Image (cartoon, grey):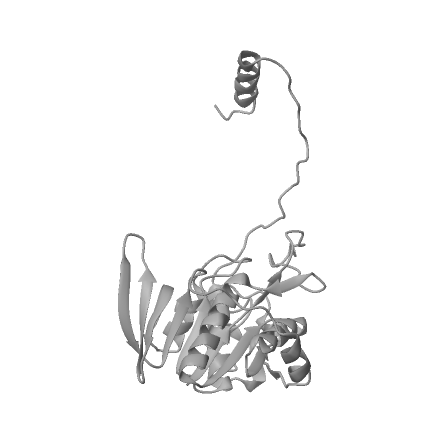
């Protein structure tokens, strides 16, 4: 079975600068890590591979430094990886990101199963996975919390819906976005780090894609435009109060009223 996992490098800190002109995060030089939700998708892929056999490929979109998360995936057991990196991809919203990755998947090969984390910690939209499924014209399901059975031509899954748990059988090829409770991700292996230190990471840019129309990528292909974005102001002010319960409750009420919370 050919399995593809979409992974992303996200900031490892909340102290990230924002480009005021474009409204996007300045990722260069920032401490980064693999998106936590993608670890669950990768673990799911590795367990399916261990059970039915096959090959696990990972794909990521980002600047050259995003190769680090692909190397981490190698250390966990992934067999191959590709990075979609081109300045023309920068500033993409969820629609342009979905289209870019779908084009990258077409370039990377044919896959029976595509797995994504539920969402990313820097965007939190949970939309990229389903939108990719639409662009790839394949059946897809979100909020997958359990793999019930992997068959020869289909997969049976359990989805965590708002008010119910639903079980569905989906034919291959298909795309799934998984919840964080599906499996406990394994730790990277030092042995695999040594074994894979020279493993190739393919890099694809716009010129490698079938669709080379620049208006479909990056800021040009993003119908969502950010008017203004700014980092939150940190407020370290604090007060310490002493007194009886009645005195403190009166003081707290006056403070809340002063701050217009009540």
What residue lies at 27% left-to-right and 66% top-to-bottom? 167
- The quarter of the picture where the N terminus appears is bottom left
The percent position of residue 20, horizontal first and vertical second, equals 65, 54
Residue shown at the point (48%, 76%) measured from the top left: 46
Q: Position of residue 41 (x, y in %)?
A: 47, 69
Quick check: 99 left or right of 30? left
Taking the spot 41% from the left edge, 80% from the top edge, the residue there is 51
Q: Which x, y percent locates residue 245?
A: 54, 15
Decide: is 31 above or below 82. above
Q: How many marks can you see? A: 0
Q: Nearer the viewer, residue 77 or 206?
A: 77
Residue sitting nearer the eye, 137 or 114: 114
Examine the rendering and report whether any part of residue 210 can be seen. Answer: no
User: Is residue 153 visible in this depiction of the protein?
Assistant: yes
Camera-side residue of 110 and 95:
110
Place residue 142 in its image quadrant. bottom left
Left or right? Give the position of 193 relative to 42.
right
Q: Quadrant of residue 47?
A: bottom left
Left or right, 256 with reference to 175: right
As drawn, 225 above or below 64: above
Horizontal and vertical percent for residue 226?
54, 55
Q: Is residue 261 above or below residue 158?
A: above
Report the residue at 45% width, 86% height from top: 54
Can you say whether 252 is above or below 200 in the image?
A: above
């Amino acid at each position: 079975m050919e399995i593809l996992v979409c992974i992303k490098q996200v900031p490892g800190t909340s102290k990230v600068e924002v480009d005021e002109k474009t409204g996007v995060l300045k990722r260069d030089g920032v401490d980064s890590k693999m998106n936590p939700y993608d670890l669950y998708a990768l673990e799911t892929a590795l367990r399916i591979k261990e059970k039915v056999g096959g090959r696990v490929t990972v794909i990521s979109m980002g600047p050259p430094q995003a190769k680090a998360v692909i190397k981490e995936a190698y250390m966990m057991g992934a067999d191959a990886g590709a990075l979609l990196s081109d300045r023309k991809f920068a500033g993409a919203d969820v629609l342009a990101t979905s289209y870019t990755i779908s084009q990258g998947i077409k370039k990377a090969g044919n896959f029976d199963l595509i797995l994504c984390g539920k969402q990313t910690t820097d965007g939190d939209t949970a939309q990229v996975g389903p939108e990719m499924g639409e662009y790839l014209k394949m059946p897809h399901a979100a909020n997958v919390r359990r793999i019930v059975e992997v068959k020869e031509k289909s997969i049976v899954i359990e989805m965590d819906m708002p008010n119910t748990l639903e079980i569905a059988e989906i034919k291959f090829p298909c795309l799934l976005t998984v919840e964080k409770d599906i499996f406990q991700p394994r730790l990277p292996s030092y042995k695999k780090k040594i074994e894979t230190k020279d493993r190739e990471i393919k890099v694809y840019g716009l010129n490698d894609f079938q669709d080379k129309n620049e208006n479909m990528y990056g800021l040009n292909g993003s119908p969502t435009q950010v008017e203004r974005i700014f980092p939150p102001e940190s407020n370290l002010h604090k007060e310490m109060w002493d007194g009886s319960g009645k005195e403190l409750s009166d003081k707290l009420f006056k403070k809340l009223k002063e701050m217009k919370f009540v």
